[in-house]
Amino acid sequence: MDFNDTPEEAAYREAARAWLKANAPKRAGAAGGGLADPADMEACRAWQRRKAEAGYACITWPKQWGGGGGAAWQSVIFGQEEARFETPANPFQIGLGMCVPTVMTVGNEADKERFVRPAVRGEEIWCQLFSEPAAGSDVAAVRTRASRDGEDWAIDGQKVWTSGAHYSDFGLLLARTDPDVPKHKGLTMFWIDMKAPGVEVRPIHQMSGASNFNEVYFTDLRVKDAQRVGAVGDGWKTSLVTLMNERLAIGGTGGAGHRTVLKLAADIATLAGSAVKDAALREKIADWFVQAEGLKYTRYRTLTALSRGQTPGPESSIGKVVSASLMQDMANAALELEDQFGIIADPALAPLGGAFQTALMNAPGLRIAGGTDEILRNIIAE
Amino acid sequence: MDFNDTPEEAAYREAARAWLKANAPKRAGAAGGGLADPADMEACRAWQRRKAEAGYACITWPKQWGGGGGAAWQSVIFGQEEARFETPANPFQIGLGMCVPTVMTVGNEADKERFVRPAVRGEEIWCQLFSEPAAGSDVAAVRTRASRDGEDWAIDGQKVWTSGAHYSDFGLLLARTDPDVPKHKGLTMFWIDMKAPGVEVRPIHQMSGASNFNEVYFTDLRVKDAQRVGAVGDGWKTSLVTLMNERLAIGGTGGAGHRTVLKLAADIATLAGSAVKDAALREKIADWFVQAEGLKYTRYRTLTALSRGQTPGPESSIGKVVSASLMQDMANAALELEDQFGIIADPALAPLGGAFQTALMNAPGLRIAGGTDEILRNIIAE
Amino acid sequence: MNFDFSDDQKFLKSEARKFLAARCPPAAVRAVLDDPDRPYDRELWKAVAAQGWMGAAIPEEFGGLGLGGIELCVIAEELGRALAPIPFASTVYFVAEALMLAGSPAQKAKWLPRIAAGETIGCFATVERPGVLTDGQVQAKVEGGKLTGVKIPVTDGEAADLAVVLARQGGRIGLFLVELAGAGVTREALEILDPSRGAARLAFAGAPAEPLGEAGEGMALTEAVLNRAAVLLAFEQLGGADRALEMARDYALGRYAFGRPIGGYQAIKHKLADIYIKNELARSNAYYGAWALGDGAAELPVAAAAARVAACEAFWFAAKESLQTHGGMGFTWDTDCHLYYRRAQQLGLVAGAAKAWKERLVAGLERRNAA
Amino acid sequence: MNFDFSDDQKFLKSEARKFLAARCPPAAVRAVLDDPDRPYDRELWKAVAAQGWMGAAIPEEFGGLGLGGIELCVIAEELGRALAPIPFASTVYFVAEALMLAGSPAQKAKWLPRIAAGETIGCFATVERPGVLTDGQVQAKVEGGKLTGVKIPVTDGEAADLAVVLARQGGRIGLFLVELAGAGVTREALEILDPSRGAARLAFAGAPAEPLGEAGEGMALTEAVLNRAAVLLAFEQLGGADRALEMARDYALGRYAFGRPIGGYQAIKHKLADIYIKNELARSNAYYGAWALGDGAAELPVAAAAARVAACEAFWFAAKESLQTHGGMGFTWDTDCHLYYRRAQQLGLVAGAAKAWKERLVAGLERRNAA
């Protein structure tokens, strides 16, 4: 158990820090807006490409596919150092965290050759097409139909809650190929071209005003059998590979944390004096700190296990259950401190640029996207 | 909506108060110890008899059966006034709140004649024999067997969590009379003599040290068919009558409340000064107050509905779910205030006679007895 | 003792619900939400005025219906349930109550009939910066009958004709009446968490202001108004919380996952039960507050604080967990969950957050225990 | 960076678990619980001493094993899991740590070998009355090398040979070593929440006392000892919390209601998941505390506070909800749930309650942010 860098780690960290100082761009635009501005997206791609060229993208992946050929600890250290900079948003996370690893695990050689390198370099973006309107959190209830048409497949149906579909080049699709077997047995996975005819993407207008998610409609979309990922009927099993990667990929929630609350409190009055001296607030801050730190170190435990070649346990699933509610509670408490003034959402007028008002409106989505709290508790309990 | 007494209510209240002042005994012994001391039990019986003679026992029941022949509002007012006195424990509550009302609702005339009046006068005490080791909260899973033997029945099996069985004269028993029909259909209700041969009562040693509950074993217990309460096979339906009465009968939890915490806080230091000025504690006290008051007024709403001849809604079930956890949280917070000193359980040394240490050890039983929190949430949700 | 509404009050409640179901469907709320230039629903305001609701608790001599505080609570619950996008609370719970508490005969005679008729919209302008409202926060000043200073945020400040303003005069803090159509008033609409309601920044530069109540009584009067408003707002919150619970239950019963309605799963059932429990506790506290309000009881400060604390907790919990129960639908713009989520925050903050009311509650208990 | 135990540490852990499963079954805990005249399990104490655990973190020159703080954490977790009824924490986490922090060479040479050998039992006597330990609470006095005053409660005060006592001398607060077998010491066993452990009231009337550490450093040294003890106790709590979760899970899987195991119901499943989540967060915080302890890092005060806050919360929640999961069995004397329920309170209070540690944590964060 050691938090200090070994000499080797320290050297890697120093090199990463120097490279970041020389190369990190100013942050361009917020991810929250769905990357609607092309300039924002270009900044994201440019940063990913620069990292890939320096071996800092997909650090643990083989060099032959554009990765860094490095170890898990290098990935952790680079992540820690990158977090100190205000780098662009990361629309590649779903592709590199879930879809492409699935292709790498169960896809054929041609697909790996074709897709891995451009994804690493930020040239192609992926989305994940599992959720459906009638299925919700129950992936096995997928109804989107893939029917044989000679050697090819024809796809009809609808997906929903597809993050980033509006800017994605490819999608990993779960479809029903056999309606006559028990529901989790008749599924098959495909990759699809999101720009192909027969694919229609409709952004979902969220309560926060942004549109990060989409509905995606398929009308007689033609797909070659070569686009199949894994065997026919193995879609459910394959989706578990993807979702396991997802749970590992979802990191902290970002946003305003306990430090920000302390900052807010320093300027605010309560009935009994300054909020920063208010024991009720201080105890809450301690509780939040312990949760946030607990999550951080739980993540380190997961990474330690991975770096030793072990499979992480259920502790790797607790991140989102804890962090989303934490964000909501913290935002609510911060607004309570602002008292009547807290209703103001204008970033120019609200304390700290309206950080907590924004967090309050984003928290519900975070508690739901990627599996509700309830579904994750089931996963943890099993 | 009116909290003030009407002139009629005020007159009744004044008479009740005067009568209580003249007649209420000093409290004799605590109910917590399972009324092991015969003198304690005698004090309980004497007080019940005196109330019955003055028309203050079972105020809403007909006079012909020993009740007060009065209205629900009179019962409420007498209850409020009685609560101001330290009266003896109430071992009659299960009989008068659940068992005897069931006999009154579905029993035959002879049983009503035989049982109601002595129960009202505190001469005979009843217990309820529903729960079994393998059934837990699931009453329909009862296994205790009642077999036909000519005109009579022979009873074999075991009950558990029987409150007051060790001092009860009679018991209301749920037994399986037909094992061949679906499980909630083959049940029948009987009254039994707790002193009859074939009944063995074994007290359960609780974590708090007390023994309020018992295991009750039946070995070839002979019961006349006339002891049947309701039709053969109607036991499940009849038990619902009993349990509905139970939910109405369970009142507040008693024990140390928010006022006691304020009193404790006045004498105690925190890192930041006096506990009574500690905002974290003050906010908790406000939360507890709101819950406790909310329960009190919810009970008034139930009583108002009853006094208008309406059936109360599910709000009448929330009392125990809220109050048991409230008691546990409050005790835990009070011990936190006492800090290292809080481990001392000796009433002579612990602050406020160890009220919170006692509450802490009683709370788990309260959260479980009479249906766990989980079972009550199911009831509320349905 | 009687702890329920009377038959007349129940009739009023059911009529109000029918009226609002027809006049204030979710589409009416969204029309205000989606249009930044619409601070409130004028048609609904007129229709509500025609019902006489603004004057429900205003004496008949001032053009009101002369009903009691409890009748106003009944109306508040239904307005809260419907998320009515009108300046009712500011006008009725705050300004009309302030006038009835502290107004001179002339002030009452001038303004109460106009409020009762729906001709005057009011706003209560006390806050100047983040944090709990304390003496130190009040910088606005009246000199020679002219008001100078800034109030932000002022709920319904954009729509209002008449403001009750907290300000200093000669070192003492008092309440003042200011007509907003007059000179020296600048208003700026604010972007707020719940755009189905309106709020503004009001800047005063020598606006004519007349005292409301005694000089030096400003903080005490504000507290008295807040106590009354807290009970009425608690009923609005209760109405919203009950509706949020209904929405969650209806969704849960109609939605299937893993082959059965999600409402059949204990995780959802127990969540609904938890919402129900908080709502019922809030309802019981609100009823006690209503009695104290209607009866003018000395218990009002503690009863109002308890009603507010319970109602803030209940509506916030119901709104966020109802949204959660809706899953992915819950956080879309087109599902109504976020309307309740926003309104729960709006009502939870508008008369001061629960945190401050908890402190008031315990201080009240200490006074009571000492007495 | 490496955030897990080493293979050697894991081996130590599994050996410790096997050893305690054999030597410290629930029956051993109950034997102390049920007998007021047995303050601890002497046989277990001797067996543990033979393993060398008391000296795990004591340098070899003083008869210890010279392992690190992390190895002691490993042992603590297993002792906590087994609810070991021995004065290990008082002797090792408090007294041995105090000696290593502040002892003179002579004091170390005298006492550490005896502690390592299991010959000396220690206790840490600081508290005199209810509430957080502050300067003002310390009334015990040393004059001319003689101690006068009362300490209550003193965990393991009945069993101990050596006390570290917080007292005033010439107006300054310091720590003192007092041999309890000597003159001027009266002990009285206390009735406590967890009778599987022992505590006493210690009255001193001119008992010989020698200073431990600098005069005037008493509060600072106490805090330093508490920081170290908090991390070690967090591991005991973690061990207890994990065992409580296992008991709940095993019971839920074996218990049937309405035709299926209660563990199949979401209400129970989600309760188990909630316990698991708190336990894992506590584990992660405790690991960080262990690193800070082992490394002597400047982060220790904040890391120790975080470890303690998380561990107190986790063990209390696990103990009470595990008991609840057991239903009616849970609150009987004969089911082991109440042993964990009692121990959760005991460990949650013995080094000061979480409430006070939260304040320490935030004060530490403020210092860190200011730096």
Image: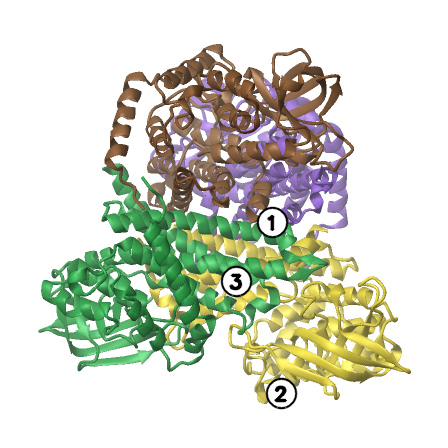
Chain colours: A brown, B yellow, C purple, D green
- Quick check: do tags 1 and 3 share a chain? no
Give amino acid for label 3: Met
Amino acid on which disc 1 is placed: Lys
The answer to whether tags 2 and 1 share a subunit is no
| Tags 3 and 2 on a common chain | yes
Helix, strand or loop at mark 2: helix
Give the Cα separation between the discs numbered 3 and 2.
30 Å
Q: Residue furthest front?
A: A109
Earlier along the polypeptide chain: callout 3 or callout 2? 2
Disc sitting over residue B42 in the figure:
2
In the image, residue A238 lies at what x, y percent? 60, 32
Residue in the image at 43% along x and 67% along y: D21
Of D322 and C200, nearer the camera is D322
**Which secondary structure lies at badge 1?**
helix
The vertical placement of D117 against C204, above or below, is below
Q: Is residue D316 visible?
A: no
Q: Position of residue A130 (x, y in %)?
A: 63, 28
**Res. C243 mark:** none
* Residue at 46% across, 57% down: D242
Q: Nearer the viewer, residue A342 or D304?
A: D304
**Could you say where residue B41 lies in the image, as x and y percent from the top left?**
61, 85
The answer to whether D229 appears left or right of C351 in the picture is: left
- Counting labels gives 3
Q: Amino acid at mark 2?
A: Glu
Residue picked out by circle 3: B327
Q: Which residue is mark 1?
A: C278
Residue visible at 73% across and 46% down in the picture? C9
Q: Position of residue D93 (x, y in %)?
A: 28, 62
Give the CA separation, mark 1 to mark 3. Answer: 17 Å
Say left or right for C233 vs A254: right
